[in-house]
Amino acid sequence: EYPKLTVPLTLESGKKTFRVKKPEEITDDDLLGVIRGLVKSEKTVLELQKKETSPYLQVLEAYLPKMAGRDEIMAWINENIDLSEYKSPMQAMAPIMKHFGKLADGNMVKDILQKLSQG
């Protein structure tokens, strides 16, 4: 029960950290940004505690859209990107991230591109 109560309270306080906006001006992207920040903070805390997850992190992540997986990113790259058009595969990062936006982990995309460049 503790995390379910904490999340709405934390989100309320997070909304107030933005530049002053009227409640009706706050967008879903603003709230998702607050949640992503809280997730990042919680992961840092868990890392220091040498833990993988927590009930609080699970509740926060339930509010976020599903991230693109490695297979989904690979499939999109294979269908839409011709790596031979780039001097370096890493230059393909921009169109990939533009397509996926915040739904793709930049480090994962970088890792995929590095593996593709090796063979």
Image: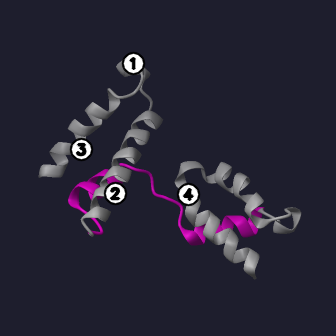
Image quadrant containing the C terminus: bottom right
Side of 84 relative to 72 (left or right) = right
Which amino acid, mark 4?
Ala
> Which mark is in front, 3 or 2?
2
**Circle 1 crowding by C-alpha within 10 Å: few under 14, some 14–19, many from 20:** few
Which amino acid, mark 3?
Val
Task: Kindly report the distance in space between the C-alpha atoms of the residues bearing marks 1 and 4.
Answer: 29 Å
The label shown at residue 7 is 3
Residue picked out by circle 1:
20
Task: Kindly report the distance in space between the C-alpha atoms of the residues bearing marks 3 and 1.
Answer: 21 Å
Q: Estimate the x, y position of residue 60 in percent, counting from the top left.
A: 31, 51
Q: Could you tell which of marks 3 and 2 lies nearer the N-terminus?
A: 3
When asked about the image quadrant of residue 112, the answer is bottom right
> Which mark is in front, 1 or 2?
2
> Which mark is in front, 1 or 4?
1
Q: Could you tell which of marks 1 and 2 lies nearer the N-terminus?
A: 1
Q: Estimate the x, y position of residue 115 in percent, counting from the top left.
A: 68, 76
Residue picked out by circle 2:
44
Towards the viewer: 117 or 63 = 117
Tell me if residue 57 is in the magenta stretch.
Answer: yes
Which amino acid, mark 1?
Val
The label shown at residue 62 is none
* Vertical comparison of 107 with 10: above or below: below
Q: Which residues are magenta?
A: 51-80
**Circle 4 crowding by C-alpha within 10 Å: few under 14, some 14–19, many from 20:** many
**Circle 3 crowding by C-alpha within 10 Å: few under 14, some 14–19, many from 20:** some
| Contact (Cβ within 8 Å) of mark 2 with mark 4 | no
Circle 4 sits in a helix, a strand or a loop, which is it? loop
Residue picked out by circle 4:
104
* Vertical comparison of 118 with 78: above or below: below
**What count of labels does the image hold?**
4
Circle 3 sits in a helix, a strand or a loop, which is it? helix
